[in-house]
Image (cartoon, helix red, strand yellow):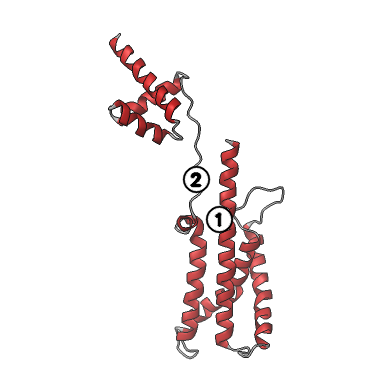
Amino acid sequence: MKEDSKSSNVDQKILRIISEKRPQSVEQLLTLAKEDLKIPEHEILELILKMQSEGKITLKKQMRPAPCFSVYLKTGYAFWYWATIITAIITTIVVFLIPEDLYPWIYIRYVLGAIFVLWLPGYTFIKALFPELAPKTSEKPLDKIERIALSVGMSLALVPIVGLLLNYTPWGIRLTPIVLSLLALTIVFATAALLKEYQNMVKIKLKNRAEN
């Protein structure tokens, strides 16, 4: 009888904490109850789960808030961004450091140069137009094959346009301005795509939180 009375008293205290302090998560409830009840955390958690099973309280699923942009940059969602930027920068360095007659290192320049010209500009441009992390719509999202084909095709379209524009500048169509222009273009498109994906993630989080 004493144990039942003690358990009932603890239940009442937990209910009072919920009513007065309105914790927004189980973690907050555990912290508040631990300060008030002076009993181990695992015992409080067992009591909370027991109260839920008895229908005395209801634990709602809590959506994790969207991380701030600086934190988002460190998550796996931004991995493609850093891989793209690092590849573009390394390619630029290799192009300027490895001369055309330095074998076999010249093949590294060829491989990275092909990726730099035929892939990165179009890939980042398509990423900005059609981000992979986007709210669900009635339109079918791009699959990997479509994204690859569009990325290569767009790169083949963008590079000649860059060359055409450089032709009307004092720098002309030379190696240095072309490489730096493509580097700047890739960074701008990649950053725009990253910002768009971050904004979409925030919208998805808010929408899911509203639905729950």
The reply to whether residue 119 is in sight is: no
Give the CA separation, mark 1 to mark 2.
13 Å
Q: What amino acid is found at the position of numbered circle 2 in the picture? A: Pro
Q: Residue at x 31, y 15 (%)?
A: 6
- Alpha-carbon neighbours of circle 2 within 10 Å: few (<14), some, or many (≥20)? few
Q: Residue at x 56, y 40 (%)?
A: 209
Q: What amino acid is found at the position of numbered circle 1 in the picture? A: Tyr
Q: Hey, which quadrant is residue 173 in on the image?
A: bottom right
Residue under circle 2? 65
Quadrant in which the N terminus appears = top left
Residue under circle 1? 198
Residue 61: percent from left, percent from top: 50, 34
Q: Residue at x 66, y 56 (%)?
A: 142
Q: Is residue 200 above or below residue 156?
A: above
Q: Is residue 40 above or below residue 134?
A: above
Q: Between disc 1 and disc 2, whose residue precedes? A: 2
Quadrant in which the C terminus appears = top right
